Image: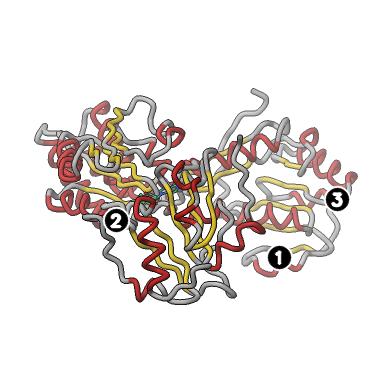
Amino acid sequence: MDYLPIFLDVKGKRCLVIGGGDVAFRKTTLLIQAGALVTIVSPDLSADFASLAGVTHIAERYRASCLDGHTLVIAATDEQETNELVSTDAKQRNIPVNVVDNPALCSFIVPSILDRSPVVVAFSSGGASPVLIRMLRGKLETMIPQAYSKLALFSARFRALVKANITHPPKRRIFWENVFEGPIAEKIFSDDEAGAETMLHAMIESEKQGNPNAVGEVFLVGAGPGDPDLLTFKALRLMQKADVVLYDNLVSKPILEMTRRDAERIFVGKMRGNHTLPQEGINDLLVRLALEGKRVLRLKGGDPFIFGRGGEEIEKLAAHKINFQVVPGITAASGVSTYAGIPLTHRDYAQSCVFVTGHLKDDSMDLDWEMLARPKQTIVVYMGLQGLEMLCAKLIQHGLPADTPAAIVQQGTTPQQRVVSGNLASLPKNPEVKTLHAPTLIIIGGVVSLREKLAWFKPSP
Ligand code: SAH
């Protein structure tokens, strides 16, 4: 290890910055955030400094006497000679010194940080690879949401109480792990501090009574239309937390592989007319697993609340007073149309957009055809392939021109994406349609004609 990582308390301490440009401004901002009293020595200051309160400015060139009374100094001038001088003077006086971008002149370096105060993560490669550090920081940034700040402050509030009530240190460690990994943390993340507090008190009580058999929770997560890159940060975080995963056939394999490696995976998929587990069974299974104390991930394609029956699943959970959260996902209409180069609205072609399900019930489709056949509107049909012929015929019958552009996208956003396009009259007759299989999305309206120009997604062969 080339450097000893430490966190320095500079609250109320006098720190010196030499230089008045952009870099000096950034360093000054950092020092102020850590509570330092900053003096700046520089003949000129960039305009940005006007926004910083409580900074003392000495509008002079640097002299050794400037160092007097300072705990720490940062040289950020563009004059090599001045920077060298500051370094030598400070080292002579045993004042920690940093010269920006010049490790040889430094007695300490300033790491790259991820700030979730009071949690702060510092990164450094000792100058070896700043780009690598930036990438690592980016990765951790996605894994540690802003709300960790609140979580840390929350635990600080209750540290003493927990210590007084759970005296056995290993038990206390497990207790806190359960807090940070479980529903209490999720309450904090969803801004329900009062709810978190109630749960914490209940958890302390049950721990005192030697009954730590906590109820689990359910995450109803939208996994998007297929491309794993379309997952949200929140989805990914909960996917890596869950003990059991219930998924269906719309969840792509690469996405499933992003769930925790040791999690149990249960397929509850539904194929047309071949329900592996009826909806009631899924609802019951969610409840049962959560009551066993498990963190259950219900992973659904697209968005759980768009033709996903997510509402029914959480109704049952609510009835059993089981904690749950719902994470929205990119719905097929949005993801699939984008990857196919079809904007859902466009000033010249569509001012509105409707999502409907084309699911056939007793060989008919119960839709508001008058409303659908309005001009300048995009219609996105989920689960519509079987009823394609009827759909197109009805729309023409209710007034949409037969040459209204229409497209079917199969397995949108995945490497297997296929698009068959035409219009309301030609599409049902196109023999290619017979070769398509689920999932497919039908998009109807003038916007479909923009596809040739806008399609950028080239599925791999
Ligand atoms: N909750 C999901 C929709 C579930 S209904 C969502 O928000 O996207 C299932 C239907 O979604 C499929 O029949 C199909 O019409 C559509 N669908 C989902 N993913 C798709 C994909 N990758 N490509 C094309 N259609 C898709």
Give the residue number, with chain letter if any, for mark 2: 193
Residue 215 in view: no
The amino acid pointed to by label 2 is Glu
In the image, residue 337 sits, relative to residue 167, either above or below, namely below
The residue sitting at the top extreme is 1
Residue 6 locus on image (x, y percent):
57, 35
Give percent across and percent down for residue 443.
47, 59
Are dots 1 and 3 in contact, CB under 8 Å? no
Q: Nearer the viewer, mark 2 or mark 3?
A: 2
Tell me the distance, in whole angstroms, between the alpha carbons under discs 1 and 3: 18 Å
| Element on which disc 1 rests | helix
Rendered residue at 62%/67% (across/down): 53
Q: Quadrant of the C terminus?
A: top right
Q: Amino acid at mark 3?
A: Asp
Asked if labels 3 and 2 touch by Cβ distance under 8 angstroms, the answer is: no
Q: Of marks 1 and 3, which one's residue comes earlier in the chain?
A: 1
The residue where tag 3 is placed is: 78
Q: Say which residue appears at 43% left-offset and 48% top-offset.
A: 440
